[in-house]
Image (spheres, helix red, strand yellow):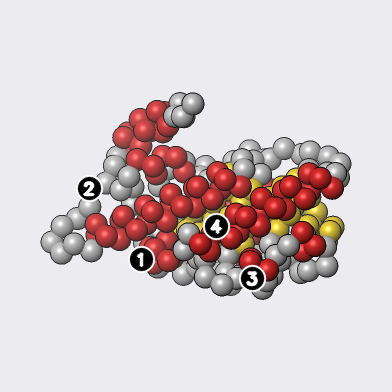
Amino acid sequence: MPPGPEPSGTPDREALASAWDALVATARRTVTDGLVVGTSGNVSVRVGDLILVTPSGVPYEQLGPADLTAVGLDGRPALGTLRPTSELPMHLALYRSTTAAAIVHTHAPHATAVSTLVPELPPVHYMTAALGGPVRVAPYALYGSEELAAHVLDALRDRTACLLRNHGTMAYGASLGQALDRTAQLEWMCRVWLAASSVPGLTPALLSDARLDEAGRKLRGYGQ
């Protein structure tokens, strides 16, 4: 994964307020879409040299403009009075090492279930290619630890999403919408694999590397 861009300067208040509104809306979507329960999971977005991130332990429906929380790429507090998410090391590791502009971390139920069963999500659908290939499972480590951040960074090598063993999901993108969409696609694929693999006497058909490469090439031209 190539390092991300290195924009400089502090964004203006309007840009920060707009980004924060989008971040809060995305965080609330993770709850309404069933990807998060309570305050589990977290969301962040990069604006210039700042990382806006959900604060630790605050229900998303309670977040407002005055709760804007931001840190620098070194993790030092930059804006706000609330403590950033406990998973900040994981977010910072991605921003320092990838092209990520936004990150979504959830405890999505089907994805978390799959993370306890296999080292890699079997490629049951061509949308696997949209995430860079078969989705790896990062080894378990204590939440919020540098060890977990290192495991996740390795699992995301040449990928845009991964599973965290006995924990959940991590996905990034060029925008909050893309990061959330990749999270939802991953949860859906996990649900499909669990359903297919639960049928007694039958084994799900899997896509070959060649089929995934073919789908990946076509997906790059998808949309308007």
Q: Do the numbered discs 3 and 1 sit on residues whose CB atoms are within 8 Å?
A: no
Decide which of tag 2 and tag 3 comes sooner along the chain: 3
Give the number of the disc on residue 137.
none
Viewer-side label of 4, 2:
4
Q: Residue at x 36, y 33 (%)?
A: 215
Above or below: residue 45 compared with residue 167: above
Q: Residues within 10 Å of mark 4 (few under 14, many from 20)?
A: some
**Percent from the top left, x then y, of residue 154?**
55, 52
Residue 81's quadrant in the figure? bottom right
Left or right relative to 18: residue 196: left
* Residue kind at label 3, given as amino acid type: Pro
Question: What is the spatial separation of the Cα atoms under label 3 and label 1, in whole angstroms?
Answer: 30 Å
Residue 105 shows in the view: no
Question: What is the spatial separation of the Cα atoms under label 3 and label 4, in whole angstroms?
Answer: 12 Å
Which residue is denoted by mark 3 in the rendering? Answer: 59
Which type of secondary structure does the marked residue at label 2 adopt?
Answer: loop
* Residue kind at label 1, given as amino acid type: Leu
Decide which of tag 4 and tag 2 comes sooner along the chain: 4
> For this rendering, which residue is in front, 209 or 192?
192
Q: Residue at x 62, y 55 (%)?
A: 25
Give the number of the disc on residue 117.
1
Question: What is the spatial separation of the Cα atoms under label 2 and label 1, in whole angstroms?
Answer: 18 Å
Q: Residues within 10 Å of mark 3 (few under 14, many from 20)?
A: some
**Percent from the top left, x then y, of residue 169?**
50, 59
Residue 84's quadrant in the figure? bottom right
Decide which of tag 2 and tag 1 comes sooner along the chain: 1
Which residue is denoted by mark 4 in the rendering? Answer: 29
Q: Do the numbered discs 3 and 4 sit on residues whose CB atoms are within 8 Å?
A: no
